[in-house]
Amino acid sequence: MAKKSELLSSSKFSTKAGIPASTVSKLIREGKIKAVKKSGKWMIDPSQLKAKAVTKASKISKPSAKKKPAKSVPKKAAAKTKKPTPREDKKPAVVKKAYSIAEFAEITYLTEKGVTEWLKTGLLTGQQDASGDWRIDAANLEVPNVRRLVREDRIP
């Protein structure tokens, strides 16, 4: 290793090598480049810039000059090709059964507060009736993240 004043921090090394700092850390962990930890920071000798792993990583992270830039999609076309979110394509066309928050909590290992939070964050689907009470769609019981929380002895 070189003198302390000549050593580079992992962020400066990544800048000079033209690779992400996370890649530098990975190369250090894998032992592909030599580094010394000083005051909680990895310090790397500038000679390691020529290491085979660094040159290989810099070729991967730099875009090739031969590649053509991606064509931009017009805004109107982008609006038409909107993909549904994972929750949208799992919504049933017709809701056959719905549960109150208390009933849904009884069926699952969720608490009533948990059911309410999941409704707010969109992990569960449901509607509010005229009085403001939530009705949770039965189709939620088939969603994998909810299915694992269903109490087998309480399935309707």
Image: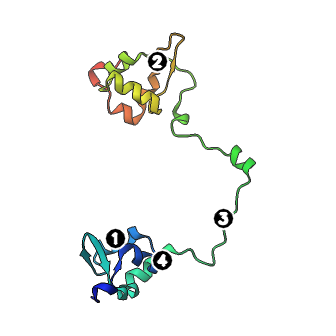
**Image disc number at residue 134:** 2
* Dot placed on the residue nearer the N-terminal end, 3 or 1: 1
Look at mark 1 in the image and give the residue it sits on: 25
Q: CA distance from mark 3 to mark 1?
A: 30 Å
Distance between the alpha carbons at the discs numbered 1 and 2: 49 Å
Mark 4, mark 3: which one is toward the viewer?
A: 4
Q: Are marks 4 and 3 in contact (CB under 8 Å)?
A: no
Tag 2 or tag 4, which sits nearer the N-term? 4
Q: Decide which of 64, 35 is in the foreground and name it.
A: 35
* SS type, badge 1: helix
For label 4, the residue is 18
- For residue 100, side relative to residue 80 (left or right): left
Describe the element under mark 4 as helix, strand or loop.
loop
Q: Residue at x 32, y 85 (%)?
A: 5
Circle 2 packing at 10 Å, graded few (<14), some (14-19), many (20+), is some
Residue that appears at 32% across and 81% down: 44
- Near mark 1 (Cα within 10 A), the count class, few <14, some 14-19 or many ≥20, is some
User: Which label sits in the foreground, 1 or 2?
Assistant: 1
Task: Check disc 1 and give the amino acid type.
Answer: Ser
In the displayed structure, 65 sits above or below 125; it is below
- Does dot 2 land on a helix, a strand or a loop? strand
Which numbered circle lies on residue 109? Answer: none
